[in-house]
Image (tube, grey):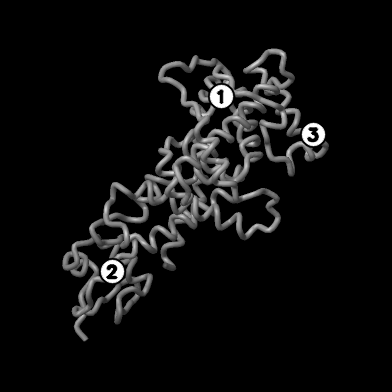
Amino acid sequence: MDYIPVSEAAKKWGISERRVQKLCEENRIPGVERISRIWLIPRSAEKPTDKRYKTSTLKVSIEEIVEKYSTYIYNIAYKLTGKTEQAEDIAQETFIKAWKHLDELKDQAALKQWLHTICINEFRMLLRKDIRQKITYIDNIEELEKDGELLVNLPENVIEEIQASEDVISMRNGCFLAMSRKLSINQRIVFSLIDMFGLSIREVADILGITPKAVKGLLYRARMNLDSFFQSHCYFLNTENPCRCKAWAEFFQTRNELQSFMQDKILDYMEKGYEFDLEVRKKLALYYHEIPNQMPRREWYQKVISQFKNI
C-alpha cells in the first residue's frame, strides 16, 4: 500500500498537521500505520468527517456553541432548579441533545431560542422522573386565563435605583432564589424566562404549550406570591420587616433547625390577603433584573466538550 506522511495529508485535506495527528490517535483514518513516532497514512484515505462540526445550512463547532451559550443555558437551568449539580446536568444534556439534532435547525439565528426550549424540556423531564417532588404541575387553565387579565406591567423608567453592597447583593440573591423555589413549577418557569431572561409571553406560551393568557396568569400569580413574601419579610421593602440579609446568613448557619420553613410549602399570596402594590412591584422588578449570572465551572465545560467524542 502507498502511504503519505502527516504533512502531506494535512495539505491534501486542508487542515493542520496537529489535527491529522489527532485523527490518527483516535483511529479515525482506516489503514493508518505508526512506526515509532511517525504516522503513515494510506494515500487513498479520505478525510474523516469532523465530529466537532455539523453542516446543513449551518457550519458551527460544538466548542463555539458551548463557549457562546454555556453561561446563558446554565443560568436558565440554575434559576429553575436552584441547585448547581442539577443545573450542570440539565445544561450538559441540553447541549448534547442539541448537537445530535443540529441538522434539523435551518436558521442559525434561532439557535439561542432553540437551546433554551431544549433546556426547559430537560428540566420538565427531570421533574417527571423525580417522584419526591411534592408540587402541583398542572394549573387550571381557565382560572389562569382570568388571572392573566389582572397582569400589570410597569411603565418604562419608573424603577428607582437601590444601592447595596456586594455582600448584601449576594445574600439577597440567595434569598430570592430560595423563595422562587416556593412557586409552583409552571410559575417558576414563566417567572424565570420572562422576568429574568426577557423572553416574550408568546415565546413562553410556545414552550409550555399553553395560551398566552394562561402564561400571563402564571406570571401574575408568581409576581404576586413573591411580592407578598418580600413585602412582609424583606428589610429593603419595609424597614420594620425582620430580615436584613444578615438574618439570611444566620439561617444558613442554623438551617437544620429551620428546614420546615423551607420545605413543602408553596407560596400563596391569597392566604395572606395580599393585594397588588405598585411600589413593591417596582422594587422587586429591579431585584429580578439585577441578579447576576452564575458561571459554570471550568471542569464542567471541559466535561461537556469531552462528551462529544462518543457521539
Q: Quarter of the image holding residue 31?
A: bottom left
State the CA–CA distance, disc 1 to disc 3.
27 Å
**Which of the pair 237/6 is nearer the observer?**
237
Crowd rating for badge 3 (residues with CA inside 10 Å; few <14, some 14–19, many 20+): few
Say which label, 1 or 3, has the lower sequence index: 3
**Residue 268 vertical placement versus 51 (above, below):** above
Q: Which residue is mark 2?
A: 49
Where does the N terminus fall, quadrant-wise?
A: bottom left
Q: Which residue is mark 1?
A: 284
**Helix, strand or loop for disc 1:** helix
Q: Residue 139's x, y, as percent?
A: 59, 47
Q: Residue 262's x, y, as percent?
A: 73, 38
> What amino acid is labelled 2 in the image?
Thr
Q: Residue at x 22, y 75 (%)?
A: 46
Pair 2/3: label in front: 3
Q: Do the residues bearing badges 1 and 2 touch, measured as CB atoms within 8 Å? A: no
Q: Residue at x 54, y 52 (%)?
A: 123
Q: Point out which mark residue 254 bears.
A: 3
Say which label, 2 or 3, has the lower sequence index: 2
**Residue 302 vertical placement versus 223 (above, below):** below
Q: Do the residues bearing badges 1 and 3 touch, measured as CB atoms within 8 Å? A: no
**Which of the pair 231/75 is nearer the observer?**
231
